[in-house]
Amino acid sequence: MTAIDTNLRPTPGAPRDYHFPAFESQTLANGLRVVVAPVRKLPLVTVLALVDAGSVADPVGQEGVAQLTASLLTEGTGNLTGAALAERVELMGSTLDAGADWDSSVVKLTTLASRLPDAIALLARVLTEPSLPDDEFQRLRGERLADLLQQRSEPRSLADEAFAQAVYAPGARYAMPDGGTERSVRGLTLEQLRAFYAARYAPLGTTVVVVGDVAIDEAVALVSQVLSGWRGNAPLLSSAPDSALVAPRGIRIVRKADAPQSELRVGHVAPARLTPDYFPLVLCNAILGGLFSSRLNLNLREEHAYTYGASSGVDWRRWAGPFSMDAAVQSEVTAAAVREMLSEFDRIRAEPVTAGELTLAQSYLDGVFPIRFETTRAIASALATQAIYGLPADYYDSYRANIRAVTADDLLRAAHTHLDPSRLQVVAVGDPDAIADTLAALGIGAVTVTEAADTLGQ
Amino acid sequence: MMSHTAPSRICATGRYLSVHMQIPIETETLANGLRVIYSEDHVAPLVAVNLWYHVGSANEREGRTGFAHLFEHMLFQGSANVQANEHFELVQRAGGTLNGSTWLDRTNYYETVPSNQLALALWLEADRMGRLLPAMTQQKLDTQRDVVKNERRWSVDNQPYGTWWERLPALTYPVTHPYHHSLIGSMEHLSDASLEDVAEFFATWYTPDNAVLTIAGDFDPAEARDLVRDYFGPIARNPSPPSRPDFSVPPRFERPLREVVEDDVQLPRAIVAMRIPPCGTERWYAASVAGAILGMRKGSRLYRTLVREQRVAADASAYTFDLTKGADLLVVDATANAEISADRLERAVHEALDALVRDGVTDAELARALALIETDFVSSLQSASDRADTLSRFATYFGDATLVNAQPARYQRVTAAEVTAFVREWCTADNRATLLYVPKVMVSEVAA
């Protein structure tokens, strides 16, 4: 064997092919869709039941009803109480949870394959015949209120909520927390949850995703056996929850006395998930603040040491979600950090990214693609995303080519179209005495100060 | 670059597993003492590289709390053939993910890359193991020191209950014990760290004979062995291995310990820790199962009693820290529901532990815990990165990576009688340390 020069960087070998797991979709007679991806790696199966009942479906004044309804699903069905149900599921070593995000409600199951028939029968029961008991409703509502109370002292949640209020019009659903405000949650009744369940949970509009150690026919037969008898219709969602606030640029400080850091959010409303500019914007964000080697992180962390980490991201939703640049910075440098963020924001829409930056982001997103799908949960979640947004059947097969196809010009055009300095809003959760004056001196907008309780309570 | 590794749940179980699944394991030890573990599979075209150095905050010298973690940051600042931050860029450009983390008694560095990039990941780890110091500068140290100070502000000082994970070890281990002091470190000690400290720490601890390298996933075994020997073989071992601190402590607290912390929080929180035998010892498995019975998921005792029935807690869980030296901790962690006082929460947690000691555990509770541990174990095998980390852990702590494959059978041998005997010996009031968080101002509008 010849000795090699260990000072020389190795060159890569030939890449091996990778394909996103093959999957198949079928629709039962009652309208329920079933998507199955057999993955024979370990004896595990993940099942997701996605219902078109996300927080955007909350009726006005009942914000939080979607999340509470979903949480209450696993609190009893038929003669099983919530406690008995938990015990039965866990004796099989399975996990069964339910929750809601903006776009959908979801019941999640992960189980050993040998337990799938029993476990999926329980999933079907909580989905189609939940008891929705008053006793557990009172408890879960109390826990949600405790959670909101807790958030008053959590800079990150406070910043997220204050930012939503800063960029969406008052009354827009997206301006409020997806789990509801203190006032709306306090007012919720069991009757409202039951009405929400009756109106929104139906086979048409529901997709069941099955991923793991199971054959397609077997999975479809199992789902069909426990869910083909489910009846009902749910109207399609229509109201848009995303109207942006039309307001001059401004700076909102949420008071946290003596805070050693300011938790920053700087941004505005972004396009909805189905924008034709999705891929250019994904790359634009990767270069601006999506990677460790992004401009924001190298600037704020590695050059200035203002922060442990700076990033940016679009919260992709069915309607227009927020885009923000985020960092927790030492209080003394708050204004300087905002200035650097604004300057990076201006730069990415003013001039093309370099070839080095673009190839880094493309190679990364292309290369990590197989690493993103090592678990049944991750694959199921990807198929759920596809179902929720109605992405094309070859979405994952063409993903890497779509990433590779974006040019610096595409990216610049997308940045110019969708990033707008005149709409930027700045939120800082921090100590106004330490940061208000220097933030005002930036000259980018008026500074207002609000209290934590008001941010979560309205 | 995180110091916040949650104590990772070790081990787990299942008859199904022990019959059907074993992690493939090949090992070798290079002449310089580096232990290497190969775990080959070809499910996906990716490979995980995972390097454990057997050094953590426990090995810091007096007046240098936080240094092991600051040093971890410095390992991303380049080496003889790698520029500052280029390590991140090279791995990401190769289509890989990477990070590192520092814990009380170990520091790990890891990458997952497309399988055709294995050589790059190994070369990068070897370059910084063999040739770190030429790249170290005062400016880099100053920058990372400020980054770490901001990490401390972010994760500890400006976070509700953020101090718990430095206060709990301080409460439960004696002042002179290596686990006692803060992992993230004090601002003052971080300020004192110098380039001489970097050189000394590197020479003392970052040597091949103090490391375990694991490669898991899609690779060619002969090629991987050649790469390892080429890149790591020339690195010199430590001619005078350092002495390790004394981790021994009495087996139990022998009296209740308690600390009350006023914090900028809205809800009280009670963290009750019991000193238990070290992770991996024979008696520890009963402790692990006791933790699952007490506080793993919604069917657990604590959730049933504190959250569902009494409604004094909004959340409750229990887990072991998985410390293998001296003594481990079994921790019960409960956050109060709205309008519940700290006193009431604390009393309820202790009453739940008293009931466990009084009544023992049932066969059904044992079966539930073992079933959950089994599924968690199978789930944890899904990612190459997790598999590699588990193998490095067993090799570092127990000197034998293949022990991981014995875990399922070991858990199956635990009986309800054994768990009951365990809690009666170790979960009594005189072996509990209570860390109680109390809101600075009990908020009045809660009751409104």
Image (cartoon, coloured by chain):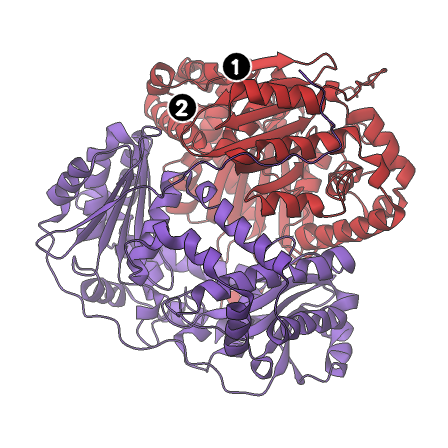
Chain colours: A purple, B red
**Residue B266: image location, x then y, percent:** 58, 59
Viewer-side residue, B43 vs B390: B43
Q: Is residue B230 left or right of residue A270?
A: right
Quarter of the N terminus of chain B within the rendering: top right
Occupied quadrant, residue B237:
top right
Viewer-side residue, A449 vs A272: A272
- Do callouts 2 and 1 point to residues on the same chain? yes
Viewer-side residue, A345 vs B329: A345
Q: Is residue A401 left or right of residue A391?
A: right
Q: Is residue A423 above or below residue B376?
A: below
**Residue A55: image location, x then y, percent:** 35, 66
Any mark on residue B402, and which?
A: 1
Viewer-side residue, B273 vs B220: B220
**Residue A154: image location, x then y, percent:** 59, 60
Any mark on residue B361, and which?
A: 2
Instruction: Report if residue A450 is visible in the image.
Output: yes
Any mark on residue B280, and which?
A: none
Q: Secondary structure at mark 1?
A: helix
Q: Which label's residue is closer to the chain start, 2 or 1? A: 2
Instruction: Report if residue B248 is visible in the image.
Output: no
Q: Give the mark toward the camera: 2 or 1.
A: 1
Residue plotted at (66% across, 51% down):
B155
Q: Is residue B399 above or below residue A137?
A: above
Q: Is residue A15 left or right of residue B304?
A: right
What kind of residue is marked 1?
Thr
Residue plotted at (84% across, 41% down):
B136
Q: Is residue B147 left or right of residue A20?
A: right
